[in-house]
Image (cartoon, rainbow, N blue to C red):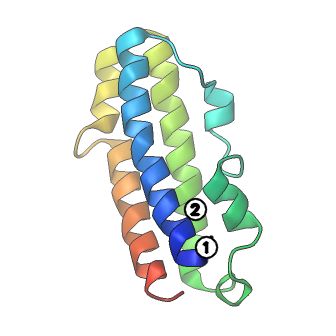
Amino acid sequence: MDAKQEIDAAIDAHAKWFVRLRVAIEKKSSEFAPGKVSLDNACDFGKWLYGSFPPHLKASPAYLEIRSLHASFHVAAAKVLELALAGKAQEALKALEPGGHLKQVSIQLVSKLTALKAQV
């Protein structure tokens, strides 16, 4: 995959987390463990981000911001999953709503990734 495809795949994969989390909230179970979800270098995008990301862009402020937002996304998603597994549905759902922490981090991450796509 080239860099633009990696970015598109990342946007798609992270959007799917909202579906997974809603299912976890509904079922109070998940195939994923919060500890694993919190790792920003375990998903395909994280592996690319920390690995074969275009070297000439790794020193850019955009790269550092994307890494930070990506890490924040994973920590926030893990927190929502913890709430879902604990049966705290209302609290978990708030994070997914517009204005919720996970939703806000996701919007910022997608915005930065979209801008980055224009640079690669």
Quadrant in the rendering for residue 65? bottom right
Answer above or below: position of 47 versus 38. below
Q: Nearer the viewer, residue 2 or 93?
A: 2
Residue sitting farthest toward the front: 1
Answer above or below: position of 32 versus 59. above
Q: The C terminus is located in which quarter? A: bottom right
- 115 sits to left or right of 37: left
* Residue underneath mark 2: 68
Q: Nearer the viewer, residue 43 or 75?
A: 43
Q: Secondary structure at mark 2?
A: helix
What type is the residue that disc 2 sits on? Ser
The number of numbered discs placed on residues in the rendered structure image is 2
What type is the residue that disc 1 sits on? Leu
Q: Secondary structure at mark 1?
A: helix
* Residue underneath mark 1: 64
- 8 sits to left or right of 1: left
Residue ID at (61%, 76%)? 2
Give the percent coordinates (x, y) of residue 48: 69, 64
